[in-house]
Image (cartoon, rainbow, N blue to C red):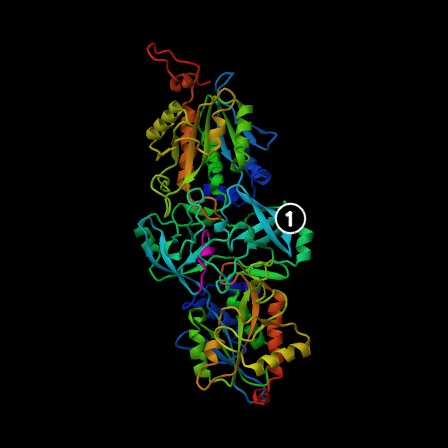
Amino acid sequence: MILRELSEAIGVSSAEDAVRDLIYEHIRDYVEDARIDALGNLIAVRRGTGAVDLRVMAAAHMDEVGMIVIGYDSDGSLRFRAVGGLDARILPGTRVLVGPDRIPGVIMWTPIHLNRSKDTVSIERLRIDIGASSRDSAQSAVERGELVAFDSRFVELGPTVRGKALDDRAGCASLIALVQGERFPFDLHVAFTVQEELGLRGARVAAQSIEPDVAFVLESTACHDLPADLDEPDQTTITRLGAGPAITVADRSMVSDPRLVRHLAQTGEREGIPFQFRSAQHAGGTDAGAIHLTRGGVPSAVVANPCRYLHGPTSVMNLSDFENQSRLLRAAWMALTPAILERD
Amino acid sequence: MPLNLKDHLQQLSETPAPSGHEAPAREVIQAAWEPLVVAFERDGLGNLIATKEGSGSEPRRRIMLCAHMDEIGLVVAEVRDGFLRTLPLGGIDYRALLAQPVLVHGREVLPGVFGAAPPHMSRDRRKYSPADELWVDVGLPADEVAARVRVGDLITFDAPFVALRGERVAGKSLDNRASVAAVTVCLDELTRRSHAWDVVAVAAVQEEVNLGGAAAAAYQIQPDLAIAIDTTFGAQNGVSDDAGYTLGDGPTLGRGPNFHPGLFKALRDVAKEQEIKLQIEILPGNSGTDAWAIQVSRAGVPTALFSIPIRNMHTPSEVVDLRDISRVGRLMAAFIETLADDTLDRIGWRLPGNGAETEGTV
């Protein structure tokens, strides 16, 4: 399963190389003009039939959140900081892989027998144990600045799957499937982007070089449909697992182009492809936030896989939501015309 | 075949066996000990009791080696909308469970995970969530979960054993499978040494809930001496110098009211003679280990405690140094080799003045 390969590949923001190599292997026979730009984005063109004259960009980000080693303690443990948005509360006891050699480590935790405090231990006070017993031993194994990823196997749970980095390797997998399928009426400019988790850095320059007329971002978005918390009912409504891919109306980074949102929704209804709208009242942004502001502005939309426990080692995603992400986009793109973007 | 300690510990670590449900661990341990002992017994609580007979004339003295085999775990407390709320079985640290994978032992084994809200929507990241706000997600629709999982089903950590650098390894349940492995090392050593006393090795149940297994086993075995083997806190960030012992610097030998001073001294002397690294751990009262229950069995048992330093105790990522495990095994074997008819007299209490020795240790 391509999702397993992509999930288990390591590509913490700024070191997406392994993911990029993997994706290129899957698309190389289907694209032209493949190139890696100055930031590390993989950009290529899937030639269309030529029936529709639009420059269409589709983007999915390759990077994942992780950590970076900043120093050593005298006992050989590693000090680190977050790369991207990490909640320190998920880190105690977590398994990690450090640096390009994927050195196994665990995030240390003071036993409950000795500390029962409910106050969160900040990342500044957490340490990684790689089995080094001295500062010298740690230094010889790991350089400061090396990146740290979650060590997490991909697991098939039946209708769902679990793994790290489904945000946004699932979007990458959907975009690969779209590239590998039947040609679209237009040339599709695909960008597998870097550094989304650090502030949409890759997508910005990709869009500046592609100069698209319209852009679609394939994402994986938050979902927290656990049993209702009566104190905070809105927590459950951002998206629901299994209710279809989520169309973003607005998030912290962008208001989606309403014409594209309408086109996507009408396509879903016409084709009988389930979809849902992502609640606009929660934080979060996507590459579309950068793309839609490039040059003179680019009408943009986001279609995302709902994923529980995002930005952790064990996200859970529904496979039919995932399959419907590419189905919905394929159907919408087959019906995409310049007329859709004309103002009323 | 020589004992491969790392492989043995991996198998022990990855076996799910929370308190009261130790059968899978018991099977693994019995298979490992089978070539090393002469007789097995399983008592009413589920303790595995293995005897390796000594060469002395009957009736022979007995030394009991006791390592508990149970691990901490959780049970399903509620099934709601396909999600599972849990209760702890033993000293579970819910602060270290967010986003951690688990196995739910329902009608079939289901991989699950403790759900954690993404940072985008967490309202208060300054506090760890209380247990009743944490849900296990097995990724199945509510009706399928209801058909497979019931209240009371067990949940264990899903944590593969990992080799770290040097001699360190990480895994779940190293408390106390590291000690079980130390007993295996000892029994293996004893196949190449002669010993006069009977050695009775116990893989005990239910230490993590009430030390019940060790109490029952000691009552039945009536040992002349006993050594409990457990884990102690490894030195690490957040653990004070007084509480933590450096990994790789040797096991600790307990000193304090839970332990017989003569037995303590005899074991410390063996470590010196054998030049095996040993740290001394001062325990001013209840050691919180099987030694606490064994010491007061029947008329009392001279008891000692070896502890293996581990880090991150009671998380799915405990860390141990394999050399410390091996040291406990070799130390116990070397001590057992010295056991003779007069051992109890030598380590026993002495009345003042006349030098007479008492039966106080039997």
Q: Along the line of sight, which residue is nearer the eye, B192 or B205?
A: B205
Count of numbered circles in the view: 1
User: Which residue is at 54% across, 38% downward?
Assistant: B70
Please identify the dominant SS of the magenta region: loop
- Span colored in magenta: A85-93
Three-letter amino acid code of the residue under disc 1: Gly
Q: Is residue A324 magenta?
A: no
x, y (%) of residue A76? 34, 50
Q: Chain of mark 1?
A: B
x, y (%) of residue A146? 37, 61
Residue B78 appears left or right of B69 = right
Q: Circle 1 is placed at which residue position?
A: B106
Q: Quadrant of residue B358?
A: top left
Q: Is residue A89 magenta?
A: yes
Q: Along the line of sight, which residue is nearer the eye, B169 or B127?
A: B127
Does residue B291 sit above or below A335 in this rendering?
above
Label 1 SS: loop
x, y (%) of residue B184? 48, 35
Rate crowding at label 1 as few (under 14), some (14 to 19) or many (20 or more) other CA atoms within 10 Å: some
Does residue A27 sit above or below A167 in this rendering?
below
Q: Along the line of sight, which residue is nearer the eye, B196 or B208?
A: B208
Q: What residue occupies the far top of the structure in this picture?
A: B354
Residue B83 appears left or right of A152 = right
